[in-house]
Image (cartoon, rainbow, N blue to C red):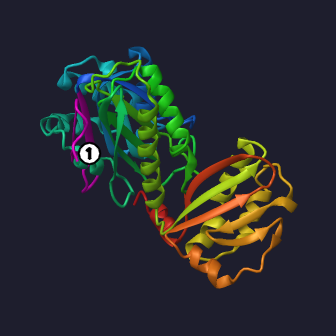
Amino acid sequence: MRLPRGFAASGVRAGIRKKRPDLGLIVAEDGATAAAVFTKNLFQAAPVVLSKAALKKTGGRVKAVVVNAGCANAVTGREGLEAAKRVRARAAEIVNCPQDEIFLASTGVIGVVLPDKKVTDFLPDAFARLSSGGVDALSHAILTTDVGPKIAQASFTLGGKRGRLVGVAKGAGMIHPNMATMLAFVMTDANVAPAALQRALKQAVDRSFNSISVDGDTSTNDTVLVMASGKLGNETKADLADFSRALESICRELAWMIVRDGEGATRVMELEVRGARTERDARLAAHAIATSPLVKTAIHGGDPNWGRILAAVGRSGARFSTKRVSLSAGPVTLVRDGQPTAYKEKDAAKVFARERVPIVVDLGGGNASALVLSCDLGHDYVSLNADYRS
């Protein structure tokens, strides 16, 4: 896969991790307008702090992205901040741009200072390997506990011209809204002003990365960045509807990949809560189900134990009447108006044994709804996280 016009990428091994590539680089040859959303965790990593400030200072301008795996450089105080600044300074020197146009991102173990010399020593190699087809190398260089890389592409029409979007992401654990450890970088040749790009990104993230959950934890480093090179040559006043659709499509595809790659996951629960009084009620119910260990272990076992789902809804804080609630798994209605139906257990079990398990909860009280993707919770999740640092 080739990147949209104006972008080049690479991935190399700097030695932060023992065996795998761990340093990625993206360069916009003539710079790019940019927009980003970041974690709401109060323990924000050094790269998040610096990148947020830089985007604000430049008014949404990025020349290059430096991203490393194997070390989050979070909760590392002044020492971690200075390490990140040294990486930024070296990258700016190599790419030949102001330091504030360098965007930093990190992922890995929290509480360890970034070994910045390893990064700065290998940045020239990463720069030399840049290519428009470097997205595959980049996608491997940003992984931590992920089973495999996550890449998506989409096309759109903007101002009568056909443009492209390519996105790359990582994430398998510490995944939950605001944001749901994950990083995502989306590149496009569209010409979009920073403010409009920010609006489109926020809407796309709310409907994708903020609607997934693996384990109920959010990281100190979560970042989604979108960059627009402007090489398409469209007018900035052009209608962004199709561009926004394509951006949301990419984000949703990457979000699904993250949930499917959830640590130890074997199934994805595609959950819809409908019939709620308000969107807040719908989200409260959906997130209670999506994060319930009892629901997630039932999904892992292929067990249609729907009582766990309704119990989660009941404690969620959502407002509803228990006499109006209905629940279905695919074509099988399990509960109608608060009462079990005469369904066949084997029919329900078949749905719960799928790779994609569709669940619909209807609260019967309004028109608001919420869609959330979650995954099962099994033995491998515990094994992976119990041994993560060793």
Q: Quadrant of residue 207?
A: top right
Task: Please identify the quadrant where the C terminus is shown.
Answer: bottom left
167, above or below 157, in the image: below
Density class for disc 1 (Cα within 10 Å; few <14, some 14-19, many ≥20) is: many
**Residue 215 magenta-highlighted:** no
Magenta stretch bounds: 1-28
Say which of 22 and 313 sits in front.
313
Q: Is residue 172 in view?
A: no
Q: Quadrant of residue 55?
A: top left
**Residue 4 magenta-highlighted:** yes
Q: Is residue 163 in view?
A: yes
Question: Residue 389, position in %: x, y?
Answer: 41, 57
At x 51% / y 45%, what residue is drawn?
Answer: 209
Q: Is residue 93 left or right of residue 204?
A: left
Q: Is residue 93 left or right of residue 67?
A: left
Say which of 133 and 11 sits in front.
133
Say which of 68 and 365 sits in front.
365
The residue to which callout 1 is attached is: 138
At x 20% / y 22%, what residue is drawn?
Answer: 93
Q: Quadrant of residue 342?
A: bottom right
Question: Residue 252, position in %: x, y?
Answer: 47, 48
At x 61% / y 66%, what residue is drawn?
Answer: 296
Amino acid at dot 1: Leu
Q: Residue furthest front?
A: 160
Q: State the SS at label 1.
A: helix
169, above or below 89, in the image: below
Q: How many marks?
A: 1
Say which of 91 and 133 sits in front.
133
